[in-house]
Image (spheres, rainbow, N blue to C red):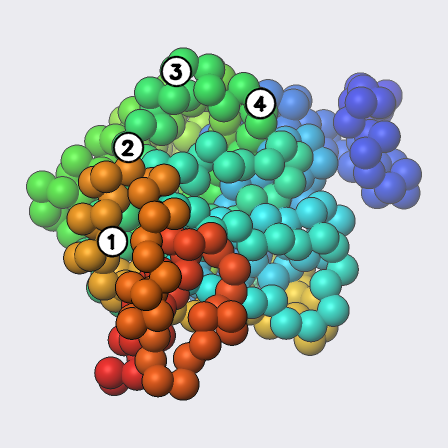
Amino acid sequence: MSIRIPPWFTSRFPEERMKKFCHSEFGLELFKQFLSIVGTHLFIIGNPGSGKSQKIDYFLELLCKLETIIYWDTGKDDVLPLFNFGKPIQFLIPYGCKLEIKGDLPVECIVTQVMDPGQYFDLIKKDWINIISVRNFFSDERELKKYVKAIFKGFLLKARKGMFSAWTPACIVADEAHVIMGSLRIDKSQESQDTGRDAANILKEVRSIGIRWIITSQGYYDLQGTARENAPCYVACRGTIVDRRDNPRLNWLSGFARNCEPRHGWIVLPNGEYFGRYSPITFPYFPSPAGVRIVYEGYADLIDTSETDELLLTGRMAFTDIPSELIRSSLAKDDKLEDLPDLGVYGKYVMLRKVGMKNEN
Ligand SMILES: Nc1ncnc2c1ncn2[C@@H]1O[C@H](COP(=O)(O)OP(=O)(O)OP(=O)(O)O)[C@@H](O)[C@H]1O
Ligand SMILES: [Mg+2]
């Protein structure tokens, strides 16, 4: 077989690896139908522990050399293998919360606090791995859903206006998609239906501006019908169940996927062709870097904003006018203003309220 994968792709990876990749029918088709076509979505399905998060890494390790990555943190250490991909990492977290990465990091890593949920996608760094980390910073699932909804509010509008052209092409990863996109299987509420419809619209529209999604879920039916139709690549892992009328290929593969191992799976490409024909594909394992740990501190929904909300009404700059006596009077007995992290006056004020809350408990 002649090599038909261009150097702009092969030059980004080790030569040995590309020799194998370019000479396999699978590598060639994956390149032609998925990797080289920006905006092509991928949907990974499988029951708990079937290797979904690990399979994301298989695609991300390739895509992070080609596109900006935006990864929704599941809060379950799934982000750790990303530290081995050689790309700088930015964590985006809610304002007033704290994320600490302990251990020797193999790449540059920064943490950015985000003041307003509407700002997350404005702060994406091109060609970096951007990790949106909100799940562990909410004590109440409903508050998390509201916050995520606020993150997406305006996303489509800004996308349509071309406001993301500074960092596209990009790949947004939603592992455990029901958390951010809602799931009618888990939650039949109106809010979940609305979120599902928004997600379907986003999938449909962002493709044309070079943003793809990788979505994992425990069930094919977690996503609304129109959203599924916009995910032309699939990976079937253990426990995939799909009705024949909805997707005959996935229905057929689900018979084989009933009892397979977490490292196994089948890939269905946009033209309906699938890989894993004679035996399932064996995906590599992506380890976490030794000794690296992430510590999440604080809850965005427990910060008492009653007073700060009032102040916000008078504009953000108004915080510079908070009299230092007011700040000092919020201090607990043993706290010193100088010891608080320097987050600007507003940040200090929020931190003070947190310190106050901690002391009350
Ligand atoms: N490619 C692989 N090679 C070897 N072991 C694997 C592989 N993929 C997954 N595993 C094993 O299966 C376990 C579960 O994998 P993973 O966390 O990716 O599953 P998951 O479907 O995302 O689970 P959950 O639904 O709980 O998030 C891993 O901790 C690992 O032990
Ligand atoms: Mg997982």
The amino acid type of the residue labelled 1 equals: Thr
Q: Nearer the viewer, mark 3 or mark 1?
A: 1
Residue sitting at x 48%, y 43%: 173
Q: Secondary structure at mark 4?
A: loop
Q: Based on the displayed image, in which of its 4 quarters is residue 32 positioned?
A: top right
Question: Spatial distance from mark 2 to mark 4, Cα to Cα?
Answer: 20 Å
Residue placed under numbered mark 2 in the picture = 153
The residue identified by callout 1 is 308
Amino acid type, residue under disc 4 in the picture = Ala
Q: Residue at x 36, y 61 (%)?
A: 324
**Image position, residue 166 (x, y; %):** 58, 23
User: Toward the viewer: 87 or 50?
Assistant: 87
Q: How would you rate the neighbour count of disc 3 (Cα within 10 Å): few for under 14, some for 14-19, many for 20 or more?
A: some
Q: Where does label 4 land, which residue?
A: 166
Residue at 63%, 49% (x, y): give it: 89
Label 3, on which residue? 160
From mark 4 to mark 3, how far is it between C-alphas? 13 Å
* Camera-side mark, 4 or 3: 4
Hey, what amino acid is under mark 2? Lys
Mark with earlier residue (3, 1): 3
Query: Which element type, helix, strand or loop, lies under badge 3?
Result: helix
Comes first in the chain, label 3 or label 2:
2
